[in-house]
Amino acid sequence: MKPVGPIPPGFAVLDGELAIGGRKASELVAEAGTTPLFVYSRAMLDSRVAELRAALPARIGVNYAVKANPHPAVIAYMAGLVDGFDIASAGELALCREAGIDPARISFAGPGKSDAELEAAIAAGVTLNCESEGEGARALAIGARIGRAPRIAVRVNPSFVMTGSGMKMGGGAKQFGVDAERVPALARELIAGGAEWRGLHIFTGSQTLSADAIIEAQANVLKLAAELADAIGAPLPKLNMGGGLGIPYFPGDTPVDLARIGAALTERTRDLPPVLSQTELCMELGRYLVGEAGVYLARVIDRKESHGVTFLVTDGGLHHQLAASGNFGTVVRRNYPSAIATRYGAEPTEEVNIVGCLCTPLDRLADNAFMPRADVGDLVAVFCAGAYGATASPSAFLGHGPAAEMLV
């Protein structure tokens, strides 16, 4: 038997079923008219942002990294909760514009921005997080051609990394950002070329559960930003400090100590170097804001045995939940938080493998998990599905298509 990961707080049992946003899973599926279905909870989004605001010093803004979950309803709802939005493509820019978000609240990162993307962002008034000298030169040339000064920050590739992060975004040779020692010269060139100087973006890593690692990285970011601002010789309007706060996915994972991180940031922001005294500070968070607010629901379409092993075959799978299947960034497969949604209040009685509908042995949602008995028609829930699920999975694989999504 293999344990499943910890189910996030915020869910309830209603008439023996999993309740999301105060509504039973079966009712939500009936409203959507189909499975598989991603459900995102407004109440849990509210709660997470409120907890974050309460822990962080008031001068630290919160930006939402749209790549974590670009569902239009989620973007529109987050507009009332966060200070800014970080995008990584013209497609995400279009989604934000359609949601009525002021382009002045948007910054655009990514190492491979096309000229068309640069022009769309410059024309709209979006801040470009410049990733290279070449990109900076292209942005200045495009701005001159269309008669609009580009708003530009420089993304920094620092020499340090966030220890223990699931995905390291800095340190050593990277496609992301400009090596720290080259940043001052580039910034001065951009300012001299007529750009509206917007500051620095320093992102060191993601999915970290260690408060010590996050506190250390944030201290390093603030120190580096002050050194770079001094070397640039111009005030630093804004510093995007990155994020890195993770969420528990697997057995043994524990939530990051937000109170400790907030206390350390409060202490550091009380005594910032003079060069950062007027700088707007923000954290860029995606998974931490939306990950635990999402649930993936799939229906059991067959119950079968093979060599004494019970399989619950669902109409979902890795084409919607690649990470939960163990095929996205993990070496050893471990079970995500999961449950039988329509038997949520029942005691577990059997060991089962929950699998998807695809013709590949990689399509697994839970291995040897101890669950209440489930039959054809029951609903399976995979938790922590609010980030990097619907759009980070190969939904076109084998032609089954995307899952439905809803915000409740």
Image: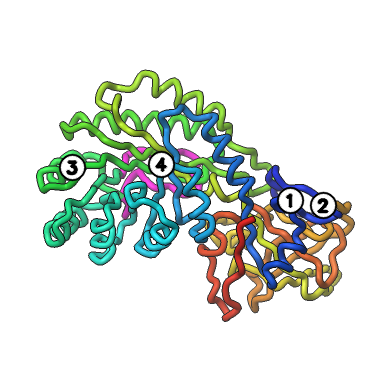
Q: State yes or no: discs 1 and 2 in contact (Cβ < 8 Å).
A: yes
Residue pointed to by mark 2: 14
Relative placement, left or right, of 402 versus 202 is right
Q: Residues within 10 Å of mark 1 (few under 14, many from 20)?
A: some
Q: What residue is disc 3 on?
A: 187
Dominant secondary structure, magenta: loop
Q: First in sequence: mark 3 or mark 1?
A: 1
Residue 243 rendering spot, x and y as whole percentages: 45, 41
Of the numbered discs 1 and 2, the one sitting upstream in the chain is 2
Q: Which residue is mark 1?
A: 22
* Residue ID at (21%, 56%): 135
Q: Position of residue 79 (x, y in %)?
A: 47, 49
Q: CA distance from mark 3 to mark 2?
A: 56 Å
Q: Which residue is label 4 attached to?
A: 242
Three-letter code for the amino acid on which mark 2 is drawn:
Leu
In front of the other: label 3 or label 1? 1
Amino acid type, residue under disc 1 in the picture: Gly
Quarter of the view holding residue 289: top right
Q: Nearer the viewer, residue 160 or 395?
A: 395
Q: Which residue is located at x 57 percent, y 61 percent?
A: 389
Report the span colored magenta: 157-176
Q: Is residue 142 left or right of residue 348?
A: left
- Numbered disc 2: secondary structure: strand
Where on the picture, by quarter, is residue 63?
Answer: top left
Question: Quick one: quadrant of the C terminus?
Answer: bottom right
